[in-house]
Image (spheres, rainbow, N blue to C red):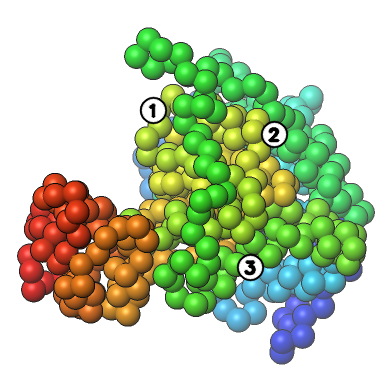
Amino acid sequence: MKYPSPLPSMPGDSVDPFPDNWTYLKAELNWLDRVLSLAIARQRKEAKEVDRLARTRADRATSHWWKGLVSLEGEIAYDSPAEMPRRRASKGSYQQQMEAKIQASEQRQIGLGLPLLRNRLQLSVFEKNLVLMTLAPEINRRYGQIYNYLQETEQPGNPGLPMVDLLLRILCRNDAEWRLGRQYLTGDSVLLGHRLLEVQSNQAQPFLTRLVKLSDPLVNFLLADKPDVRFLEELLQPNLSIAHSHPVPLKQSGTTFDAPTSWLRSFPSQPAPSWSDLVLPQTLLEALQHLCQRFKSVSQVDQLWGFEEWIDQPPVGAIALLIGASGTGKTMAVRAIARELGTPFTMVDLALLPPNAHSQVLLAIAEHAPTVLLLKSAQIWLGQSPPLLETEILQFLHQRQQQRSITLLSTTNKQAVKPRWQRRITPILEFPLPDEVNRLRLWQQAFPPQTPLHTDINWEWLAHQFRLTGGEIQTIAREAAFYAAAEMPEAKLAMKHLLQALKARHLKLGKG
């Protein structure tokens, strides 16, 4: 058995958009009606079975305890999440039809409140349906009455809000989903972090019995005839305002540091490599150059050409994820961007921060608002166990997009970055290991012009024999210079010095 679909089948590729936000909401509520109908039917059946087996009034009063021990035609225990029917993936499934109509509406610039919220905060399916269930009593009191019935709280004066337990029973299909859903209703949730959702606190009651309510401003946004994304941003703005406060001084080993000067390092735009100095694939080079062109042209495109009025709050700043092994040129690329724009760039390596410094660094970035920002070891914030709340990271990314800036997040391993961040950040630029042709270029440009080089250096052999990154080649070149300088002042850097440097790095000749 699958969830009944409130939408008719839509053959072919042509999909009609929702004409307005209210029509969309009615479609979502039709789905919720059918899900609640299943829950009501099940509860009534369960009540009849309890009445059939109960012998006394006490039996009925304690049925939620003993029905978990007595087999009622395969019924699950009272404290287990409801096994809701699984949806089959089919061409005409409800979810696919809804997504197709939502996308068609977006293409027609028809604002739909809940999809705008979902996309803005990257909500999961559970979180989106959680918002829908908590919104329903704001639309019709009938939903409050249904919730009271399902929660067995039909006494006069009950507010008709869903409890945590009901939300988990309706929206979760198994234990794993129940545990994950419960996490969405705790303090680390993005909805709670933005104060869009409130789980009413009552320490005298179990968590499952607490009521859940949407904030009134969010209700107004979701029910608007034409939801305005600017109003949504205003809802989130109070949580962003902390980013404009002064950074808190950091304390380490008894010394007070000021966050901007301790962890954020600023570098001048000159001297820096030019585009011609970068040894990268042509497509990657063009993508980096496009970031600069985007920065230069944003005012022309949005203001003079009208895209600012055509698209609600188009992002001004660019954010890119740089992926590649150490030494493949990520930092050099950022230096080239800063040179092209004629502006300094700011860098912070998140791997070097002590645990208590991350929030202060976030504040320092907001305080100084660097035009070009490089965050190295970005997986620290974008990985599985970040030192910041996801809400804080979302606020940071949003703030950077609202500033005329370029933010580069670098990491050596793409898999270390959560898929949700990979979906949100574009472009993702991968820096490959250099091939033999590029290694030859890297060897030949690894030495400053004033370095005295011997003619016996076999550049082609070095490029063929050792599979090194540009950063490794640069390090070996400098070490070879030390070997050459140690012999005599007028000595030239020769092949033997390079071999000494290679040997010192435990590289075996004849192997890459």
How much space separates mark 1 and mark 2, taking CA atoms? Answer: 23 Å
The kind of residue tagged 3 is: His
How much space separates mark 2 and mark 3, taking CA atoms? Answer: 29 Å
Task: Return the residue nearer the eye: 433 or 463.
Answer: 463
Q: Is residue 433 left or right of residue 101?
A: left
Looking at the image, which residue is at 10% across and 58% down?
500
Residue named by callout 2: 240
Residue named by callout 1: 354
Residue 245, position in %: x, y? Answer: 67, 23
Q: Secondary structure at mark 2?
A: helix
Task: Return the residue nearer the eye: 94 or 20.
Answer: 20
- Mark yes or no: residue 242 visible: yes
Q: Earlier in the sequence, mark 2 or mark 3?
A: 2
Q: Secondary structure at mark 3?
A: helix
Residue named by callout 3: 290
Q: Secondary structure at mark 1?
A: loop
Front of the two marks 2 and 3: 3
The kind of residue tagged 2 is: Leu
**Height in image: 206 above or below 12?**
above
- Position of the C terminus by quadrant: bottom left
Q: Decide: marks 2, 3 in contact (CB < 8 A)?
A: no
Q: Is residue 299 left or right of residue 184?
A: right
Front of the two marks 3 and 1: 3
Front of the two marks 1 and 2: 1
Looking at the image, which residue is at 81% across and 34% down?
216
Task: Return the residue nearer the eye: 486 or 12.
Answer: 486
